[in-house]
Amino acid sequence: MTARPPALFLLGPTASGKTAVALAIASRLPVEIVSVDSALVYRGMDIGTAKPDRETRERFVHHLVDIVEPVEAYSAGRFREDALRVAGEIAARGRVPLFAGGTMLYERALMRGLASLPKADSAVRAALDERAAREGWPALHAELARVDPPTAARLDPHDAQRIQRALEVHALTGRPLSDHFAQDALGAPPFRALRLSLEPSDRAALHGRIAARWQAMISAGLVDEVRSLRARYALDAAMPSMRAVGYRQVWETLEGTAPAATLADRAIAATRQLAKRQLTWLRAMAGVERLDCLDAGAEGEALALAKRFLDA
């Protein structure tokens, strides 16, 4: 392990303060921030992703932000390729990558590799789509919970894209998607890594942060941002970019499929569910230094741990 290059990871649920801690580390240590976020990759999606502003990104290097258009798909496999390339470039400059974000599947893909999965099968997908039209995606999510409880636990009952893929893999291989992830990894991690996780000691306090963050996004013009994206690109509701939490709820409001009066409640509830799934994933991870994101000393503790690791 000592021959592998060092890397820092800063993980945590949404609204846990990852950006502030990452910037504190970047201001004191020779690191470059690499985003581990499936929504920050999209250009033009700034408010709803809490993307660092241009001034911050000019002061502190951020990688894998604003790299694809919202009409494009971006996968865990592509993230792994991009992240390994960027990490190599950072190391060549004598610096260390600080992977910061909350898309846990991306972290897993980077550190453990990707499972060898079957290609998409149009017939299986069509059958699942037909069932979903009749029964609804929550019913298919309930089926997934029976055949693949670990995967179902981290998916929202309305996450059509991922529920479909998990059931498709089970139908084609006879094995749960979670088994593929557990058994088919590529081998040893590519880094000698310190993984820090910002987690709340009080879930209700995190929920308060989520609500405040949503109100700030609305005040900053999130609805107009989505309107602008719809005018600029040929988007539809099934695209990964528009399935991101917050964007999906605004889309439903603009389409008239859900009332504007419930926008805040729907978005806050979806964000809380996202945080719950992120925490479930994090708490199943071993070898992680866990810090209370509600503790005023968490930033200093993270910096001290990172410095000790890099000095070792």
Image: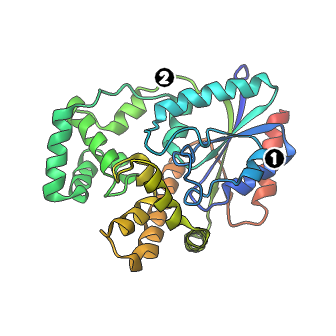
Q: Secondary structure at mark 1?
A: helix
Q: Who is closer to the viewer here, 267 or 189?
A: 267
Q: Quadrant of residue 167?
A: top left
Q: Residue at x 51, y 45 (%)?
A: 38
**Residue 132 at x, y percent in the picture:** 19, 53
The answer to whether 84 is drawn above or below residue 54 in the figure is: above
- Label placed on residue 59: 1
Crowd tier of the residue under label 1, counting other residues whose Cα lies within 10 Å: few below 14, some 14–19, many 20 or above:
few
Reading the image, the residue beneath label 2 is 186
Spatial CA distance of label 1 from label 2 is 36 Å
Taking the image as shown, residue 53 lies to the left or right of residue 14, namely right
Q: Earlier in the sequence, mark 1 or mark 2?
A: 1
Q: Quadrant of residue 205?
A: bottom right
Q: Secondary structure at mark 2?
A: loop
Q: Residue at x 38, y 69 (%)?
A: 253
For the C terminus, which image quadrant? top right
Taking the image as shown, residue 84 lies to the left or right of residue 158, namely right
**Residue 217 at x, y percent in the picture:** 58, 67
Amino acid type, mark 1: Arg
**Residue 203 at x, y percent in the picture:** 55, 69
Amino acid type, mark 2: Leu
Q: Who is closer to the viewer here, 13 or 134?
A: 134
